[in-house]
């Protein structure tokens, strides 16, 4: 199996050399659909792909037994972290506080380690002892089933996409943005889409220039906090649709409401496996109760990441009802 | 006769050149130390803005003259090489390659090498603190180097000429 292109171009150059060598060998024998590479200091190297998880042996072989996996030395993990931070930990202070780095290409690296706090607030992680490298992937057509359910009479409906982590929310949202921007004959015309890409995951921007295809009518605000970014885009770019990843905070909810009152449709994602679960989160509950979203799409991994389970009209007559 | 005159001129020329070289070393060191401090000051400003280190180093390189500019540029280049060096390793390598083209002494290089353990690896305030410390050490070294220049630059030039003349006199 060829080594994934995204790994080769974006991840491989940022790994400590000895780790890169072992992973190169491992990925040649791994099945397609690499999703995560997990490095934990002093513990075995792990990869996760669409079909499951494997531990990587010292010779690059794949095994189901963690004790046969090659140990990631703390020094290798520190080296990898330094390379991913471009040797500039200070430049990613806010991201580190939020527990992740985003690599060129939109690949996200989750961080854990020893927390340094000041006055009860997380200042930084030092040393970093776990890296979860998640590969971002463009899947054209990931939103094919969803798109017709989110458009009516040539306009997009404000939509919340729900799924558990790793179930393809971001991938589906990215394809939805692209589809709305290009337009789909018989479903909706091409729309102006504004994307607030706080974590650079949707567009994978490098120096603000999107590396992924989000369509010809899409403007991307890269690295900007969602709440601030949504209002900025509405003022400056007159979008018909604003798209954001991972809504959850109360400030996000307020910004979504403001956007909706400006006549703009909002498409966002949130962690959660069902509408009832999401209603328990304070920020999202207020949004759902106020009827901000006309549709809620629930995804799962049942038939691979991005499987569309159902689409709900959360404010249908007589309460929520399934519409697809 | 002509042979002797040519020999004398050769000796005088060589010792004068050597004297000028030594004097030039005294003059170059304070200049290189000033350039290093300027480069570190730019680096501190860029780090304060959150500029990633390779770009910050290139900015520092653009603000100072050769050969000090090459040291900053080389650190950035080393960090971008395949396999990637950490900033500290890149700094050590850069000094190994570039120091001999400068008039810097061991104590000057030690001030820079002290940065290797922390460069890029901590928050902005901590980076600024370490860069300040290095600048202070270099400023101290510059004051001493300037005093040496005042004291020895002219002496070295005269010593070159006079030692040549003395050698010619003895040999004649």
Image (cartoon, rainbow, N blue to C red):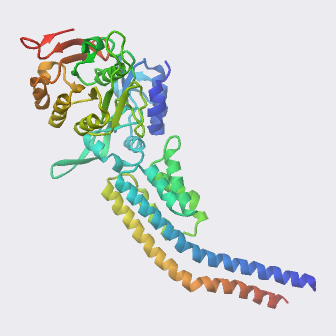
Question: Which residue shows up at 64% across the image and 83% down it?
Answer: B156
Residue B95 showing in the rendered view = no
Pick the front one: A211 or B127: A211
Residue A258 showing in the rendered view = yes
In this rendering, would B91 be left or right of A204?
Answer: right
Place of residue B147 in the rendered image (x, y in percent of width and height, measured from the top left): 51, 82
Residue A187 position (above or below residue A292): above
In this rendering, would A133 be left or right of A297?
Answer: right
> For the C terminus of chain A, which image quadrant?
top left
Spot the residue most to the left.
A318
Residue A293 position (above or below residue A15): above
Number of residue marks: 0
In this rendering, would B63 be left or right of B25?
Answer: left
Place of residue B78 in the rendered image (x, y in percent of width and height, measured from the top left): 52, 49
Pick the front one: B28 or A289: A289
Place of residue B61 in the rendered image (x, y in percent of width and height, measured from the top left): 51, 58
Place of residue B32 in the rendered image (x, y in percent of width and height, measured from the top left): 53, 69
Q: Quadrant of residue A300?
A: top left
Q: Quadrant of residue A315?
A: top left
Residue B169 position (above or below residue A131): below
Question: Which residue shows up at 24% across the image and 30% down it?
Answer: A246
Question: Which residue shows up at 19% across the image and 17% down it?
Answer: A295
Pick the front one: A39 or A237: A237
């Amino acid at each position: 199996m060829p080594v994934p292109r995204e790994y080769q171009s974006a991840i491989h150059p940022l790994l400590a050399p000895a780790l890169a060598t072992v992973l190169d060998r491992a990925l040649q024998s791994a099945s397609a659909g690499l999703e995560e590479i997990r490095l934990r200091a002093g513990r075995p190297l792990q990869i996760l792909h669409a079909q499951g998880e494997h531990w990587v042996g010292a010779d690059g072989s794949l095994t189901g037994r963690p004790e046969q996996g090659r140990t990631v030395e703390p020094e290798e993990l520190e080296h990898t972290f330094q390379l991913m931070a471009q040797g500039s930990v200070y430049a990613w202070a806010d991201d580190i506080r939020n527990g992740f780095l985003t690599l060129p290409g939109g690949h996200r690296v989750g961080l854990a380690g020893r927390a340094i706090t000041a006055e009860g607030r997380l200042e930084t992680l030092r040393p970093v002892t776990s890296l979860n490298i998640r590969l971002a992937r463009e899947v054209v057509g990931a939103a094919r089933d969803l798109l017709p359910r989110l458009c009516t009479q040539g306009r997009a409906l404000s939509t919340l996409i729900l799924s558990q982590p790793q179930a393809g929310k971001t991938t589906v949202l990215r394809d939805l943005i692209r589809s709305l921007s290009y337009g789909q004959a018989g479903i909706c015309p091409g729309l102006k889409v504004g994307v607030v890409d706080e974590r650079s995951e949707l567009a994978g921007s490098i120096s603000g220039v999107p590396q992924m295809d989000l369509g010809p009518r899409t403007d991307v605000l890269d690295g900007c906090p969602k709440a601030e970014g949504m209002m900025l885009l509405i003022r400056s770019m007159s979008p018909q649709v604003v798209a954001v990843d991972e809504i959850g905070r109360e400030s996000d909810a307020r910004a979504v409401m403001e956007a909706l009152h400006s006549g703009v449709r909002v498409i966002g994602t949130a962690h959660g496996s069902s509408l009832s679960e999401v209603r328990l989160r304070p920020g999202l509950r207020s949004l759902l109760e106020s009827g901000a979203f006309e549709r809620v799409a629930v995804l799962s991994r049942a038939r691979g990441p991005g499987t569309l389970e159902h689409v709900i009209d959360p404010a249908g007559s007589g309460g929520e009802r399934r519409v697809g | 006769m002509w042979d002797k005159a040519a020999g004398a001129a050769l000796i005088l020329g060589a010792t004068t050149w050597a004297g000028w070289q030594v004097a030039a070393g005294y003059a170059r060191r304070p200049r290189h130390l000033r350039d290093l401090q300027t480069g570190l000051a730019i680096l501190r400003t860029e780090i304060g803005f959150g500029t990633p280190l390779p770009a910050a180093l290139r900015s520092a390189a653009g603000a100072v003259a050769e050969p000090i500019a090459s040291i900053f540029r080389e650190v950035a280049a080393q960090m971008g090489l395949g396999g990637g060096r950490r900033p500290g390793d890149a700094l050590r390598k850069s000094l190994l390659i570039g120091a001999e083209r400068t008039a810097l002494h061991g104590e000057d290089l030690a001030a820079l090498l002290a940065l290797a353990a922390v460069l890029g690896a901590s928050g902005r305030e901590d980076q600024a603190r370490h860069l300040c410390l290095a600048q202070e050490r270099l400023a101290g070294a510059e004051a001493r180097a300037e005093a040496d220049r005042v004291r020895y630059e002219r002496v070295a030039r005269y010593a070159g000429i006079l030692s040549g003349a003395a050698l010619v006199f003895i040999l004649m």
